């Protein structure tokens, strides 16, 4: 009998593998720990949270995007002297000497965690500024913002639900900005986080987006998961909505677009709650606008991938308001599938150039399967993170939807009659109709053959 047979008789020979199994188990645990520590979504400490420095800087607009910029930031130390320093990018040579200043307003959000708000006013349209926030000895890195243009040629980003996978989503957001340096602002369609009352989730969300949020204004809609006090406290938005809903319903103009953001959690039926107040405000908001394009953003889809009661309510009691008031395109989310409708009016598919197109986005890693095919769908694509780039060029709106790797998954365009019936306009219109076919090979069609 050799030594091995003495210690491990044939019946217990499997024990010879035990040390290797134990080593493998602990090695796996160790590597898992390393991976979690490296996850940018988890590493909020590195993002500045609890370090005493300004962090999680967010640009948005509470006033006119042409001449103002609203900036908010977090600070765990209770320094009441935080401010914004800014100057035209053309005058910036690495120093803030001679920069203008705006004092920040401080609010304690949560157990010694403060948010500051600074509104920079009197800016020139379509002009870039360099800024930093904080106070002596604790300034943020310089970043820049650009005021809105009066021109009607610009691009913006739409993203649907995020809700989980913040690190992966943040990487996608950064690559979107790198690939599209001309983007002017971001619209989010709600459900930014999963647990809206969890400060930890909000910190992960802001940590993941921090490289982009300090450069591009963020204008979100509220979803069903994030309809909380934290949403209202974190996002500084135009307070021009109906009374009692000014934290989550608002509108603003950019270039030749009027953008209205709604809170679909409270879009009910006539005679109940505040339907009349909210519907009346929406009607007035849309009627008053003379902008060429009218864009709506809210969370729940009136034309869904899978039917639900809320879609019925929205179709019956809200879509008529959209249609009567010239809305062109509606961005929604909620069902975790990418889907675009054909142009719709009165519940029926309309000819190209008429009706409203509804686009459902899903930017996060939470996915549901495709729904049954409905006549109103132009395309649907399940189980893929996606984002939408909207390019406005006067009377031509093009939307390109891409997946997380930057592959085009859908594209379409709208052309206003104001571009005329010139040969170039007709050529562009033809191109718009052709584009979805061009990318059809890259689109995984639903089992029902919806295109
Ligand atoms: Fe949702």
Image (cartoon, rainbow, N blue to C red):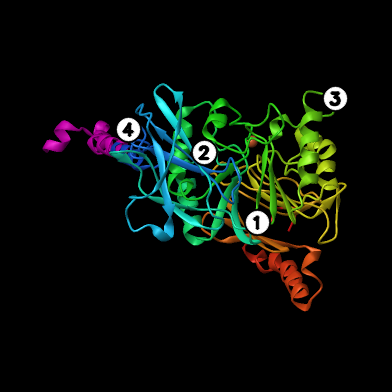
Q: Residue at x 71, y 28 (%)?
A: 243
Task: Choose mark 3 or mark 2, whichever is in front.
Answer: 3
For this view, does 37 lie left or right of residue 368? left
Query: Dot 2: few (<14), some (14–19), or many (≥20) neighbours within 10 Å?
Result: many
Q: Which residues are magenta?
A: 2-29
Mark sitting earlier along the chain (3/4): 4
In-front residue for pair 83/354? 83
Please give the residue where the numbered disc 2 appears in the rendered image: 164
Q: Is residue 393 magenta?
A: no
Please give the residue where the numbered disc 1 appears in the rendered image: 255
Q: In the picture shown, does residue 171 fall above or below 277? A: below
Main secondary structure found in the magenta portion: helix
**Distance from label 3 to label 2 (Cα)?**
37 Å
Please give the residue where the numbered disc 3 appears in the rendered image: 271
Query: Dot 1: few (<14), some (14–19), or many (≥20) neighbours within 10 Å?
Result: some
Q: Secondary structure at mark 3?
A: loop
Task: Choose mark 4 or mark 2, whichever is in front.
Answer: 4
Q: Secondary structure at mark 2?
A: loop
Q: Secondary structure at mark 4?
A: loop
Q: Are marks 1 and 3 in contact (CB under 8 Å)?
A: no
Query: Dot 3: few (<14), some (14–19), or many (≥20) neighbours within 10 Å?
Result: few
Task: Choose mark 1 or mark 2, whichever is in front.
Answer: 1
**Distance from label 4 to label 2 (Cα)?**
27 Å
Where does residue 10 sit, x and y in percent of width and height?
A: 24, 34
**Distance from label 1 to label 4 (Cα)?**
38 Å
In-front residue for pair 185/44? 185
Label number found at residue 4? none
Task: Choose mark 1 or mark 3, whichever is in front.
Answer: 1
Please give the residue where the numbered disc 4 appears in the rendered image: 52
Q: Are marks 3 and 2 in contact (CB under 8 Å)?
A: no
């Amino acid at each position: 009998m050799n030594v091995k047979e003495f210690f491990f008789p044939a019946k217990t020979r499997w024990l010879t593998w035990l040390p290797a199994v134990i080593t493998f188990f602990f090695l796996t645990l160790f590597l898992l720990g390393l991976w979690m520590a490296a996850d940018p979504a988890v590493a909020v400490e590195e993002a500045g949270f609890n370090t005493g420095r300004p962090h999680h800087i967010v640009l948005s607009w509470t006033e006119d995007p042409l001449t103002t910029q609203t900036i908010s930031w977090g600070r765990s130390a209770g320094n009441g002297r935080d401010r914004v320093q800014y100057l035209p990018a053309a005058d910036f040579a690495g120093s803030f000497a001679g920069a203008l200043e705006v004092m920040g307003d401080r609010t304690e959000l949560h157990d010694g965690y403060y948010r500051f708000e600074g509104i920079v006013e009197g800016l020139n349209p379509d002009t870039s500024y360099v800024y930093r926030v904080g106070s002596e000895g604790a300034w943020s890195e310089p970043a820049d913002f650009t005021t809105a243009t009066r021109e009607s040629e610009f691009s913006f980003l739409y993203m649907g639900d995020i809700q989980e996978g913040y690190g992966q989503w943040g990487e996608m957001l950064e690559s979107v900005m790198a690939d599209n340096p001309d983007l002017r602002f971001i619209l989010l369609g709600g459900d930014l986080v999963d647990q809206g009352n969890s400060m930890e989730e909000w910190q992960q969300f802001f940590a993941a987006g921090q490289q982009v949020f300090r450069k591009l204004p963020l204008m979100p809609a509220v979803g069903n998961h994030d309809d909380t006090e934290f949403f209202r406290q974190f996002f500084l938005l135009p307070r021009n909505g109906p009374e009692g809903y000014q934290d989550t319903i608002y509108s603003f103009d950019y270039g030749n677009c009027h953008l209205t953001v709604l809170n679909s959690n409270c879009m009910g039926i006539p005679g109940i709650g505040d339907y009349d107040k909210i519907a009346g405000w929406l009607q007035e908001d849309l009627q008053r606008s003379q902008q060429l394009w009218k864009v709506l953003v809210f969370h729940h889809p009136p034309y869904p991938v899978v039917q639900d009661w809320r879609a019925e309510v929205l179709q019956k009691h809200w879509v008529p308001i959209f249609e009567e008031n010239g809305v062109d395109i509606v961005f929604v989310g909620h069902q975790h599938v990418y889907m675009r409708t054909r142009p719709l009016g009165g519940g029926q598919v309309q000819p190209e150039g008429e009706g409203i197109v509804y686009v459902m986005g899903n930017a996060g890693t939470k996915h549901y399967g495709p729904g049954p095919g409905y006549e109103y769908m132009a395309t649907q694509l399940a189980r893929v993170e996606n984002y939408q780039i909207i390019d406005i060029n006067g009377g031509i709106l093009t939307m390109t939807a891409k997946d997380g790797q930057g592959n085009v998954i859908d594209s379409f365009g709208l052309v206003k009659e104001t571009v005329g019936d010139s040969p170039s306009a007709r050529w562009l219109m033809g191109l718009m109709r052709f584009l979805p076919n061009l990318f059809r090979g890259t689109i995984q069609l639903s089992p029902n053959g919806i295109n």
